[in-house]
Amino acid sequence: MKNRACALIGLLGLVCLDLSAGTLDLTTCSLAGSSGYGTIEAQCGILLRPENPAQADGRQVELKVAVVKALSPKPRPDAITIINGGPGGSSIEMFADMAGAFTRMRRERDIVLIDQRGTGESNRLECPDLDEAAQGYGEAEIAESTRACLRALNADPAFYTTSVAVQDLEAMRVALGYEQLNVYGVSYGTRVALHYLRQYPSSVRTLVIDGVVPPTLSLGPDVALNAQATLDSIFERCAEDPGCHSAFPDLSGDFDQLARELKASPISIEVAHPNTGKIERLDLNYGHLAVTIRLLAYAPETSALIPIIITEASRRNFVPVASQAINVITQLSGSLAYGMHNAVVCTEDTPFYSHSMDWDALEQTYLGAEQVKVLQGICEVWPAGVIDPGMKDPVISDHPVLILSGEFDPITPPRYGEQVRQTLPNSLHIVVPGQGHGVIARGCVPGLASDFIDAASVADLDAGCVERLGSSPFFVDLLGPPP
C-alpha cells in the first residue's frame, strides 16, 4: 500500500499526496542572486506538480528545486529550507544573495530550495503593469491592466496560493528523501512556514520565522500605519541625536514641505542611474518619494539616509532622492512576480479586510490609503484561489520555534512576533535592537539560528549578543555620519 497523506483543501475536497519515498533527478548548476551576480554551486532539478492538486493527471507545472550540499561528508537526515517573502520573491535568488548568513547552518545539513510556484523559475507569473507603480492608476486603468495580465498568464492563478505551495514543499521533501525539514521563512515566507507547520507537523523539525506575518493578519491596511510609525520614530531619533538634530532641526517640517510641493507638481530631473551610470530623466512625484522612504526604512543602513535625502530635496537638491527612487523602481520591477503576489493577496488578504476600516487613519499616513484601494481594485477583477479551512486561524504547536523581529521593522513590527508567540509555547522571541525587516544576516543572529537548529530547542539559547547591535548613525551631510 502506498504511503499517502490527505488533507481537506477548501473547495477542492480531499486531496492526497503520494508520500512513497521518491527521487528527483539533479544536475550540477550555479545559483545566481537577484542582481544576476555571484554564483553558488548546487544541484538543480525540476519537480513536476499538478497545477490543480485535485487533478493529478491534468496540466503540470515545472518547479525549480536546488540542493546546496552540506559541508560535512555525512549530513544530517533533516535539511534546511528557506522561504522568501513578497509575496512573489524567489527563494533560490534570496539564498544566493544571502548565502553567508546560512554558512554555519550548512556545516552538517543540506540546504534545499524551491522557487514557490509563480516565482523565480517556477512558472513565474508576471504582471509588469501591476507593480508598485500602479498606485498612480485610476480605477479603470487598474481594472483593465488586471484583465490584461490575467489574459497573458500561462496559468490558472487560483492554484498559486499558500495552501497549494505547502503541498509543493512537502512533495519536494518526499522526492528528495529527507526525514524532516528545518524551515526558515522571512516576511510573507513566515506565513508559508507557519502553514506548512500546521498542515504537515510531522515533517517539521524546527521553525525560524523572521519578520512575522501572523496568520490572522490581512496584508494591506496595516502597511501604511506601520510605515508611518517607523517614519515617526526616525524623526524622533533624529531629534534626540545631537548631530542629526543640529543638521536637521525641523526634519518633520521639511518632509511636509517637500510632500506638498511634489503633490502639487512633479519635478523633472536628469540623474545618473545609481547602477549603470546612464543618465535618465525622471518626473519625480510624491509617489516616488513615498515608496522610496518606505523601502529605505527596511534596513538601518538605508534608514540613516532618510534625513539627508528629505532635507536636500526640501532645499531643491533633488538628485539624492531621484537616484534612490530610480534604484527602488529598478529593484521592485525585477524582484517580485506580481501575478503570484495578486494570486495570494486576492485570496488570503483582501477578502478578510474589515468593513469598518479606518480610512481616515490611513489617509493621515504618508503612504495614504491608495495602496489599499489599488489592491481592492485589482482583487475585484482577480479570481479568488484555493485556501485551506482554518488558514486564517492562529497556529497552535509545541514544535521548537525561533521568532525574530527587528526593533524598527516598518512592515512586520515586533508586536506581530509577540502575537504569534502566544500560541507557540515552545518558542523564543528575539527582538534585535536598531534593526529593520529581516534580521537573519545581522551580527550574531546567524549563529543563534544555527545553535537553535542544532539543539532543536530554545531552552538554553542565550540571545544577549544581539544587544551589541543598534541603528546606523544618521548621515548629517552628503559625506556621511559625523566623525
Image: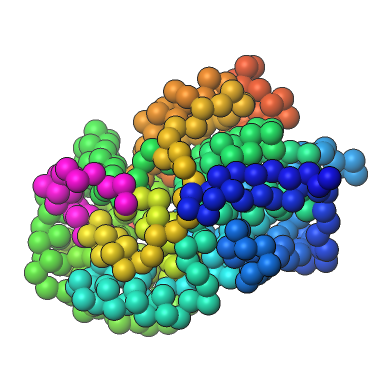
Q: Is residue 419 above or below residue 321?
A: above
Q: Is residue 189 magenta?
A: no
Q: Is residue 435 above or below residue 478?
A: above
Question: Is residue 303 at least partly visible in the picture?
Answer: no
Q: What residue do we see at 71% from left, 53% from top?
A: 172
Image quadrant containing the C terminus:
top left
- Which image quarter: residue 479? bottom left
Q: Is residue 9 left or right of residue 29?
A: left
Q: Report the span colored magenta.
A: 351-371
Q: What residue do we see at 38% from left, 38% from top?
A: 216
Q: Is residue 267 left or right of residue 98?
A: left
Image quadrant containing the N terminus:
top right
Relative to the observer, which residue lies in front, 389 or 247? 389
Identify the colour scheme used. rainbow
* Percent of width and height locating residue 335: 49, 65
- Which image quarter: residue 346? bottom left
Question: Is residue 46 at least partly visible in the picture?
Answer: yes
* Percent of width and height locating residue 309: 27, 58
Q: What residue do we see at 47% from left, 63% from top?
A: 158
Q: Is residue 149 left or right of residue 155?
A: left
* Percent of width and height locating residue 429: 49, 26
Relative to the observer, which residue lies in front, 33 or 82? 82
Q: Is residue 336 above or below residue 471?
A: below
Q: Is residue 365 magenta?
A: yes
Relative to the observer, which residue lies in front, 214 or 237? 214
Q: Residue furthest top?
A: 459
